[in-house]
Image (tube, grey):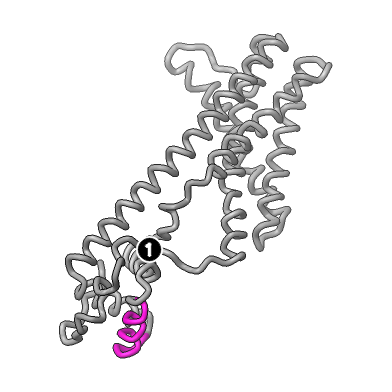
């Protein structure tokens, strides 16, 4: 709930945002920095870890299961290749549509806030003053800050969005395809890891074992990389990703083995 402005605090009409010419055409803006851009690039680790892990585990279960059930290398490669293609496209498109929907929601919220600022400029001004008072500023200091912000409408609008809704309005302008491409490419990379084991000229049973080893190595590598971007130990982060991946694969194996018989079906071979 927004803080309630003190009705005793009066703000002269010439000090509110709507008196700044052209304010309704502005977009929320804050000064950009190299550090912000670097952090945005590092935050792509979410898509990379998600995509690689999902690609490894999804494809691992399918190719090892098909490898044991069919015993034919061509069936494994065809199934694995289709899984890689369909999964990469699905993940990339899903990330794109999810980001697009988020941008639309944020943009609608920005427009709603601008409408409220136009309809009730005094109330919005007093509301922002109240937010700064909650941050520890005195009433005089808060009014001085907001008066100055009102002369820079694009920054004032950013402050209103951040304080009232807790969101970064720059999301509405982020039309980059970096996220969807990272998600799709990382899934494809993860999917390729267990498939490689079945390309090697070894027995199918050996290929299934190698697929498990390659998958573990892939999970470890992506976890180790993620650890380099944090203050955590690279090794502990790598082991964490491996542990979660192993747990997911084990649960999938147990579900495929024991749930189908409850409904009168043969066990489903997931992971051999």
x 72%, y 55%: residue: 234
Q: Is residue 182 above or below residue 69?
A: below
**Residue 97: horizontal and vertical position, in percent?**
43, 38
Q: Is residue 239 above or below residue 124?
A: above
Local secondary structure at mark 1 = loop
Where on the picture, by quarter, is residue 143?
bottom left
x 52%, y 26%: residue: 255
Left or right for 244, reference 173: right
Question: Which residue sits furthest front?
Answer: 21
Mark 1 residue crowding within 10 angstroms, few (<14) / some (14–19) / many (20+): few
**Residue 232: horizontal and vertical position, in percent?**
67, 60
x 73%, y 27%: residue: 211
Question: Which residue sits furthest right?
Answer: 201
Left or right for 8, reference 183: left
Is residue 143 magenta-colored? yes
Where on the picture, by quarter, is residue 146?
bottom left
| Range drawn in magenta | 137-149
Query: Residue 264 or 112: which is nearer the viewer?
Result: 112
**Residue 2: horizontal and vertical position, in percent?**
26, 69
Which residue is the site of mark 1?
Answer: 166
Q: Main secondary structure of the magenta part?
A: helix
**Residue 20: horizontal and vertical position, in percent?**
29, 73
Is residue 47 magenta-colored? no
Can you say which quadrant of the picture contains the C terminus? top right
Q: How many marks overall?
A: 1
Left or right for 181, reference 27: right
x 38%, y 60%: residue: 27
Where on the picture, by quarter, is residue 213?
top right
Can you say which quadrant of the picture contains the N terminus? bottom left
């Amino acid at each position: 709930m927004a803080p309630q402005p003190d009705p005793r605090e009066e703000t002269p009409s010439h000090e509110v945002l709507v008196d700044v010419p052209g304010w309704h055409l502005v977009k929320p803006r804050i000064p950009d920095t190299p550090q912000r851009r670097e952090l945005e690039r590092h935050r792509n680790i979410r898509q990379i870890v998600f995509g690689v892990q999902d690609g490894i585990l999804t494809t691992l279960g399918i190719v090892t299961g098909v490898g044991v059930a069919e015993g034919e290398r061509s069936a494994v490669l065809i199934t694995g290749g289709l899984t890689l293609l369909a999964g990469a496209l699905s993940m990339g498109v899903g990330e794109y549509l999810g980001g697009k929907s988020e941008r639309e929601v944020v943009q609608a919220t920005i427009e709603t806030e601008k409408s409220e600022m136009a309809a009730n400029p005094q109330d919005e001004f007093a509301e922002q003053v109240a937010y700064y008072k909650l941050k520890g500023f005195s009433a005089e200091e808060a009014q001085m800050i907001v008066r100055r912000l009102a002369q820079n409408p694009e920054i004032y609008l950013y402050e209103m969005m951040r304080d009232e809704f807790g969101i970064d309005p720059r999301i509405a302008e982020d039309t980059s395809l970096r996220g969807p491409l990272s998600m799709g490419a990382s899934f494809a990379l993860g999917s390729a890891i267990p498939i490689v084991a079945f390309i090697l000229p070894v027995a199918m049973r050996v290929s299934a074992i190698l697929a498990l080893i390659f998958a573990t190595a892939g999970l470890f590598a992506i976890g180790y990389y993620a650890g380099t971007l944090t203050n955590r130990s690279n090794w502990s982060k790598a082991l964490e990703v491996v542990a979660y991946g192993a747990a997911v694969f084990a649960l999938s194996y147990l579900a495929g083995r024991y749930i189908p018989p409850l409904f009168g079906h043969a066990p489903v071979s997931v992971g051999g």
